[in-house]
């Protein structure tokens, strides 16, 4: 019988075609893998062991295949957990992003996608008219950060107001903000669309102040931050903008609304049948 040496990679790709159905693991081994919390090895071990026996793998290759699968499985689970915790609004990624359609210069887009600014704990402000890709860009950057192993938290101003009211009663606002800042990147979306309530304005200030030089904050806004005093009390606006812009990249979008253009061109919906 010929011997096949498995290649490095996912263990599921190593399972040989035509190998008889693998018998279940012995109960004591199954129990041991549960105790050690190795769910991915436990799931694939029967097939790997059956294939290894049929193809006469070296013992080291069996271990490599099993532990590679455990590592890959944990990475998949961690990615799913980070993505769920981020609470992205739509799930848009750069797969659907059309760089040429954005008014942000291509070199700037590429620089943002490296995420170096997040690692340097710098901020990002994307401001401009509605429909010019601000939220799409921030969500795609957030998704890329999650895929790179970073933690992301997504908020609207209204979310921050709710957070503040919920924790003000028992004086745990600071603790709540600290939990938010466990994320490497905190996104606050759509500033300037609606009047800003006092709680939301205070929540934004507390977040930006606590994150200052410790975490990255990215915001999208219909207004340049210099005009935030039109939305919130001048004192809060000045203090917020001062901290937000000190280490910030400011990108201004322009042009017509992509959503409106697609709607007028009949591209916003599928044709009725």
Image (tube, rainbow, N blue to C red):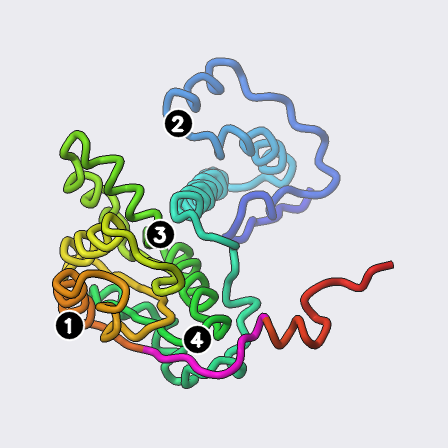
Residue 86 position in % (x across, y down): 39, 48
Give SS at disc 4. loop
Mark before the other along the chain sequence, 3 or 2:
2
| Residue picked out by circle 3 | 155
Mark 2–mark 4 distance (CA, rounded to whole Å): 50 Å
Quarter assignment of residue 177: top left
Can you say which quadrant of the picture contains the N terminus? top right
In the picture, the disc for residue 37 is 2
Mark 3–mark 2 distance (CA, rounded to whole Å): 34 Å
Give SS at disc 2. loop
Look at 50% across and 62% down and name the residue there.
93
Whether residue 258 is in magenta: the answer is yes
Q: Are marks 3 and 2 in contact (CB under 8 Å)?
A: no
| Residue picked out by circle 1 | 246
Whether residue 249 is in magenta: the answer is no
Mark before the other along the chain sequence, 4 or 1:
4
Residue 190 position in % (x across, y down): 39, 62
Mark before the other along the chain sequence, 4 or 3:
4
| Residue picked out by circle 4 | 129
Q: Is residue 27 visible?
A: yes
> Magenta segment range?
251-259
Mark 2–mark 1 distance (CA, rounded to whole Å): 45 Å
Number of numbered discs overlaid on the protein picture: 4
């Amino acid at each position: 019988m010929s011997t096949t040496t498995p290649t490095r990679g996912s263990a599921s790709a190593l399972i040989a075609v035509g190998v008889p159905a693998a018998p279940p693991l012995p109960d004591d081994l199954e129990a041991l893998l549960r105790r050690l919390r190795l769910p991915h090895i436990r799931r694939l071990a029967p097939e790997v062991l059956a294939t290894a026996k049929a193809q006469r793998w070296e013992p080291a290759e069996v271990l490599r295949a099993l532990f590679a699968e455990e590592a890959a499985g944990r990475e998949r689970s961690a990615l799913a957990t980070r993505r769920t915790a981020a609470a992205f609004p739509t799930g848009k990624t750069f797969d659907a992003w059309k760089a040429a359609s954005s008014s942000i210069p291509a070199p700037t887009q590429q620089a943002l996608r490296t995420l170096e600014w997040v690692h340097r704990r710098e901020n990002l402000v994307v401001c401009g008219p509605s429909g010019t890709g601000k939220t799409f860009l921030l969500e795609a950057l957030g998704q890329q950060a999650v895929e790179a192993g970073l933690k992301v938290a997504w908020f609207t101003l209204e979310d921050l107001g709710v957070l503040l009211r919920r924790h003000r009663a028992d004086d745990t606002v600071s603790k709540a903000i600290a939990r938010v800042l466990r994320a490497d990147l905190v996104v606050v979306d759509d500033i300037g669309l609606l009047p800003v309530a006092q709680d939301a304005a205070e929540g934004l200030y507390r977040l930006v102040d606590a994150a200052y030089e410790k975490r990255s904050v990215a915001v999208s806004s219909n207004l340049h931050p210099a005009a935030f005093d039109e939305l919130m009390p001048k004192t809060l606006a000045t203090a917020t903008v001062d901290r937000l812009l000190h280490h910030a990249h400011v990108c201004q979008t322009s042009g017509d609304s992509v959503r409106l253009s697609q709607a007028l061109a009949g591209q916003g919906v599928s044709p009725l049948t």
